[in-house]
Image: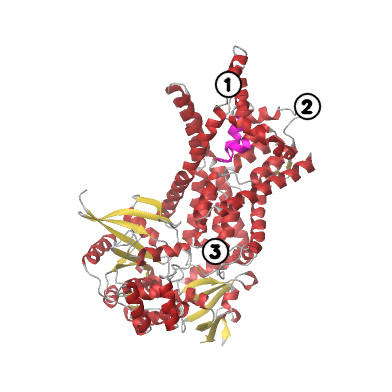
Amino acid sequence: MQKLSDIAIGKEYIVKSIDNDELAQKLLEMGCTPGEKIIVERKAPFNDPIAIVVSGFMLSIRKEDAEQIIVKKL
Amino acid sequence: MNSTKIKVVLAGNPNSGKSTLFNALTGLRQKVGNYPGITVEKKTGSCNLDTNLSAEITDVPGAYSLYPKSIDERVAQLVICNKKDKDYPEVTVVVADATNLRRSIFLITQIIDLKMKVVLALNMVDLSLQQGVIIDVSSLSNRLNIPVVAINARKQEGIENLKKAIIEANSQEMATSFFDVSILFKKIIEGTNELRNSENDYGSFLALCLQDTNVDNKLKDICKKYQFIPSRAQAQETIRRYKKIDAVVDSCCTIVRIKSNRSITKWLDDILIHPIFGYFIFLGVLFLIFQAIFSWSAYPMDLIDSWFTDLSILVAATLPSGVFNDLIVKGVLAGLGGIIIFVPQIAFLFAFIAFLEDTGYMARVGFITDKILRGFGLNGRSIIPLLSGAACAIPAIMSARTIASWKERMITIMVTPLMSCSARLPVYTLIIAMIIPAEQSWGPFNLQGLVMMAFYLLGFLAALGTAFILKFILKAKERSFYIMEMPSYKIPDWKTVIYTIVEKVKVFLFDAGKVIIAISIILWFLSSYAPGNRFEQIETKWAGKENAETHIAAEKLEASYAGMIGKSIEPAIRPLGFDWKIGIALITSFAAREVFVGTMSTIYSVGDNSNIQSIRERLESVQNPDTGKAFFTTAVGISLMLFYAFAMQCMSTLAIVRRETNSWKWPVVQFIYMGALAYISSFIAFQLLS
């Protein structure tokens, strides 16, 4: 188990859980549900925000939010 | 035409091609209005479905679900979920991006469960095919039990089929459901159904989840009773719904080859959001935009200016002379000309912004600037309002609606008017020409141009600085997020770009226009009338003398109500280096800043006020009665420019801020702090320089 904010660019992981209710509401409805494949595509300067590919599309998300997304190596 | 009209709502995810479809269905038969009670813009258009049935189509802002997160997204939910709403549709069309089928059909399954008549318009099927995914449209239609139509909104393909499907959906009762939420929350939903006097399980579930938006004590009680936590329930429901969607998507899609469509996007992103070059490219884009606003738009602006001069002369000569003639020419036409002249700049700016948004670049700009802007209490999404503020604060403030966090949206609205808008340009141009010698230059840089640049930069820095202070004053109502889709790059759709320009220009002309014209008429009255018989005395005094007309005009203005106001505020503005004449200009500028130039020319009795050159020469020769030297020193000029850079001299912006924030508190606060900033900085500059 790792935080999304800690994983390397380009490696495949799957979403385990989202630890913040408010964040979960926003991400779940976009299809970022547990079990979905997730890849960190690139990082902005200072590693914040980060661009992730989940459920087939790219999304940008702040580092502090990525810290609350728990992922597992595929 | 003798036909029935049905209400159709067009919903869908952001970037699904919804606006393109809306334009394809309605063409130019669109109008922009407001939803009653809330501040979100409402776009409607009409469309003939067949010979005796037409539709009024409402385009609701893009949303991923019926769980709203920003003011924009709330509209979709309000219109669709409220049977009493006057826009409640007979049929809802949901646009889905075929390349993102799973996410795109989430929204429609929710609407199906509300037992509404729906049609799925599957857009970009060709792209999904290119990516190696074949979608079986008829099997999707069977699984969802609703009409599904493959369309290509850009090429206008499938539009007729979509119209037929709307007619078909309208004629049938909606009985199907997709996901039965009562299996998760049976008891509480039954209780809520009873409370709401409804049999719609999903409607009751949404009412429970969204209760914070319309507080109902009975709903609160029932949640307590069943230990129902809306956010948890919503998450649980979403996950279960997606499981069901996954099954549908799996059965309807065949993957023929796995090929990433992201390769071009990836390649472009390597360049465009490169940690170093990315910022330089963005600066280059900004430079191009400013080039367009300031030099390319000069030609159409000159044209408009000369049309209005001709028109004024024509009207003045045609109408019988008198009060009415004066009112039309100096009140209405002058005000109208002052608004229309900015149309080219606004059109250019929004052409660029619409183009950059449509290609997908704007989401990237947010990506590389969010971290920086966050330090100032702003958000990556603030970049569009701030940029637009360089043309006009009115549409810029409206574009802040997509910012979900209340605090970040408020700060964006509060600081956007500090960006140097195009109305400040004529003021800067005139004063710079007066106080900075044209010959002076450093290498390739002309000093006048540098001063102009410096003032634009100053506006931007003032906006950031104010944002930074507000960050500590305003209390956040919720945690802020920057969750934004970064769509694959695509070639922009020119029609969408053009429609956006037309729409923004319309908003500017009508929203701002009404106020500006009203104020122009008031100002005309204040400067054309005086108490008692002051005017007659002036006329008798100058009768038969040389140059009488220009002297009369100047003295009349001094004697008029406007002149009286100018004189009464003179003691207050003296420390800034201004006299009562500038005082009048400051007051008249309240309608719109650019009125300054016209007012100055009238006050200093320039015979021909149609060109800046002659105004400049006249102003340069004005002497200071105390020193006998030129009145417009560098100190006065800089002080005046600083005043215009910071002061909130724009009625229309105040009106928009009031509308967008739904309270008078914010525009009043804005007026006071911008005024204070202007006064203090002008005071310091004048005292230091003189």
Nearest to N terminus: mark 3 or mark 1: 3
Image coordinates for residue B337, horizontal then vertical, percent: 50, 36
Secondary element type, mark 1 = helix
| Magenta stretch: includes residue A47 | no
Give the number of callouts: 3
Residue depicted at 67% across the width and 46% down the height: B678
- Quadrant of the snapshot with the C terminus of chain B: top right
> In the image, is residue B222 above or below residue B643?
below
Q: Does residue A67 appear left or right of residue B231 in this picture?
A: right
Residue at disc 3, secondary structure:
helix
Nearest the eye: B326 or B364: B326
- Dot 1 falls on which chain? B
Q: Position of residue B425 (x, y in %)?
A: 60, 42
Q: Which residue is mark 1?
A: B535
Q: Which residue is mark 3?
A: B406
Discs 1/2, front? 1
